[in-house]
Amino acid sequence: MNFIKLPQLVDRRGKLKSKGTYSKRTTSITHRVWHHSLTKKNLAGSTADSFAVYHVNTLGWPGVGYTFNIEPKNVINTPNGKRARIVYAHDIDRRTYHVGNSNQFSLGICVAGDYRYDTMDDATLASIAELHAALVKDGIGKYDKAHNEMPGYSWKACCQYNYRDAFDWKGSKTPAKPAPAPDVYTIQEGDTLWSIAHKDGTGGVQVEDLIKANPGIDPTKLKIGQKINFGNAKEVIVQPDIKEDDKTSNSGDETIRSIQKTLNSRYGTALIVDGFNGPKTKSSLIKALQTELNKQFNKKLVVDGKWGAKTNAAIVTVQKGAKGNLTWILQAALYTEGYNPGSLDSIFGKGTESAVSKFQKAKGITADKKAGKVTFTKLFAA
Ligand SMILES: [Zn+2]
């Protein structure tokens, strides 16, 4: 096995959080399926350990869903240069959960990070390229697919990095976002749904996606010049029935989940506790801030979760020594932006001060270590 010899690979089989074991595959692996975690790559939660805790405790799976977990935040110095750590989590022959009905023949590989926003660094690209090359040499799998190129998952924003460019990485180019698949295809001589599905450049459309996308069409009677829809054309996306083992294959961040729970219980926001920092979590934090400004400083703001001039004008400066809910909101906002204050303890101490200062420097504003109007605006304005 070549993959096991990669210097950045750490064998943690049997050492991550688990509850029971995954059963053995009854067929061999044909697909290598590439994922991203949707957690920002520098956050504490972007590790195999965190994914394992989430998959076991929250989803009730036997263990982490991915056989290989690439961790951009854990860089290892190897004889070949800096490499992102690869955590080897399960024997190759275990049928782990990550693509629902396709688990049986699919190997799950997750690159930690949220590549809607994160950029991929060289150490991570190198690890993807080298792991891929080793798996090819070892004969593990024949095809590479992104999560959303697997049947039933065309709706999923995974993996959001161009994995094919990463395989060719030679230290020069940054992978671009994959080009969106075209919506409509014109039938050419000799085409069948199968041949169309396997054409290059269609973004990995599957035959069953095409059938779903073209309800009235008889696949045996295609005519040259006829136009058909691609399976990932927006209006035809069908949400599959969600079963226990394919609810999600991505892991949220533990701390973001606890922020979401606190927002729900303290401020009555109705957030889904998924550990992902999205626009709803941000607007709930603004609601919390507006509520506290009204309560503590009699500001009479409309609690609408939107950042506007009135909210900005009502901001009071939060600085070292402060305690209470405003400090908690500041800590939570810093954390979700990737600036960990250490703990979300509602006390403005050293950790919070250093997170504020790092955030201010990164945003190019005066690094006075106090959170006032400018800092809150950078945290909350869209
Ligand atoms: Zn995925």
Image (spheres, helix red, strand yellow):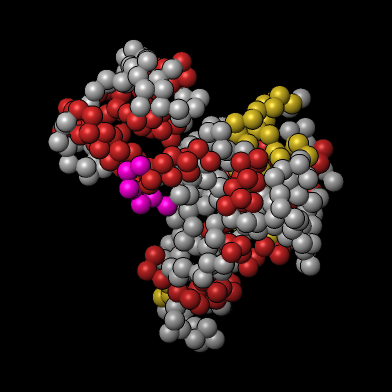
Magenta segment, which residues? 266-272
Which residue is at a point 50% across and 38% down the rendered structure image?
255
In the visual, does 368 lie left or right of 156? left
Q: Position of residue 115 (x, y in %)?
A: 49, 42
User: Is residue 171 shown above or below 279?
Assistant: above
Q: Quadrant of residue 289?
A: top left
Q: Position of residue 49 (x, y in %)?
A: 65, 40
Which residue is at a point 69% across and 27% down the rendered structure image?
76
* Residue 133 visible from this viewpoint: no
Q: Quadrant of residue 197?
A: bottom right
Magenta region's main secondary structure? loop
Q: Position of residue 348 (x, y in %)?
A: 40, 20
* Residue 234 visible from this viewpoint: yes
Q: How many marks?
A: 0
In the visual, does 37 lie left or right of 126? left
Which residue is at a point 45% across and 49% down the rendered structure image?
273
